[in-house]
Image: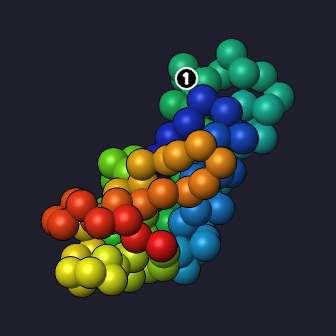
Amino acid sequence: MVASFATPTEANACRSALESAGFEAALLDANLIGVDPALWPMIGGVKVAVPKADADEARALLGAIDSGILLTSRGVALQCAACGSESVRFVGGTGATTYVCERCGGAVE
């Protein structure tokens, strides 16, 4: 298990992100929560699981996503064209997606 969520919708988003990055991922206990949400405290929510051999790498990916660092695929980060750094952070924007290099401050497209 690499993550736990209160709802199947949240867990599915996590599963999809992991699968997009090349991991095999499955939801555990999604049906139980769907039938009776009051069971959440007893079973610990909807869990996202990957094969044990991939668990550390999957947790690292989820940590990078949570911290704002965008990984485009398993183990490959966006790179800054100006300095080559892989320390790229999503900063949002109005109507446009914006990523900024943490090393040189340049915009990454």
Q: Which residue is rendered at x = 74% and y = 35% of the image? A: 32
Q: Identify whether 74 is placed above or below 89.
A: below
The reply to whether residue 61 is visible in this rendering is no
Residue 87 is left or right of residue 103, and the answer is right
Q: Quadrant of residue 65?
A: bottom left
Q: Identify whether 109 is placed above or below 41.
A: below
Q: Quadrant of residue 62?
A: bottom left
Residue designated by label 1: 42
Q: Identify whether 90 is placed above or below 55.
A: above
Residue 94 is left or right of residue 90, and the answer is right
Residue 33's x, y, as percent? 72, 31
How is the model colour-coded?
A: rainbow
Comparing 43 with 72, the one in front is: 72
Residue 63's x, y, as percent? 34, 53
**Residue at the far top in the pictured view:** 38
**Residue at the far left in the pictured view:** 103
Q: Quadrant of the N terminus?
A: bottom left
Q: Which residue is rendered at x = 72% and y = 21% of the image? A: 37
The reply to whether residue 43 is visible in this rendering is yes
Q: Which residue is rendered at x = 60% and y = 71% of the image? A: 19
Q: Which residue is rendered at x = 44% and y = 79% of the image? A: 74
